Image: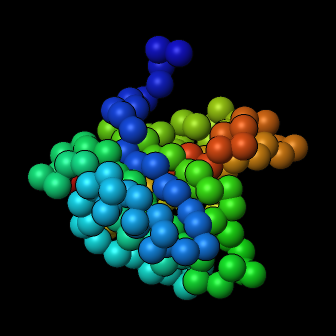
Amino acid sequence: MTNRPFRVLGVQQIAIGGLDRMRLRELWVDLLGFDSVGQFRSEGENVDEEILTLSPQGGLGLEIDLMQPIDPARKPHVHDPALNHIGLWVDDIDAAYAWLSSKGVRMADGGIREGAHGRRVCFIHPKPNATHPSSGQGVLIELVQAGGQ
């Protein structure tokens, strides 16, 4: 489709969930050597996460988010599935949200909001419904505003 008013610039993150974030950390930080660059905790999103990166200088580098539920019995279950979501850099999140919505893509509740890094984000829902036949087809997809916007 040539009339798409935004571009996907690359993979921004891969979010991995587990009941014990420290076990995830052993692999990703201690054994694979990723750098820990931050923490994020949200009662509303039921998540306690550590943010890792391959690009500590910034830019459009790849991030790994290790996510543990604050309460495993409460939703959302950030540990199930273990590959929680992928994030994509976009050049214009407002245009992406409006255009995808107009094309019948089911967007997750919450619209565009501030994410863990202070960047603007929104999510493509993993499941379609009767009014929105397009979705992530089982995968939660986060769109992340690239640049200083």
* Colour theme: rainbow
- Looking at the picture, how far across and down is residue 135, in whole percent? 70, 40
The image shows residue 105, relative to residue 113, as above or below, that is: above
- Looking at the picture, how far across and down is residue 132, in whole percent? 77, 42
Q: Residue furthest front?
A: 31
Q: Residue furthest left?
A: 57
Corner quadrant of residue 27: bottom left
Q: Residue furthest right?
A: 130
Say which residue appears at 43% left-offset and 42% top-offset. 88
Say which residue appears at 45% left-offset and 74% top-offset. 22
Query: Position of 139 compared to 21: left or right?
Result: right
Query: Position of 127 compared to 29: left or right?
Result: right
Return the residue nearer the eye: 149 or 8: 8
Query: Position of 117 compared to 88: left or right?
Result: left
Say which residue appears at 40% left-offset and 32% top-offset. 8
- Looking at the picture, how far across and down is residue 72, in whole percent? 69, 79
Q: Residue 116: tell me if it is visible.
A: no
Q: How many marks?
A: 0
The image shows residue 138, relative to residue 9, as above or below, that is: below
Return the residue nearer the eye: 98 or 7: 7
Return the residue nearer the eye: 60 or 128: 60
- Looking at the picture, how far across and down is residue 23, in whole percent? 48, 69
Return the residue nearer the eye: 62 or 121: 62
The image shows residue 82, relative to residue 88, as above or below, that is: below
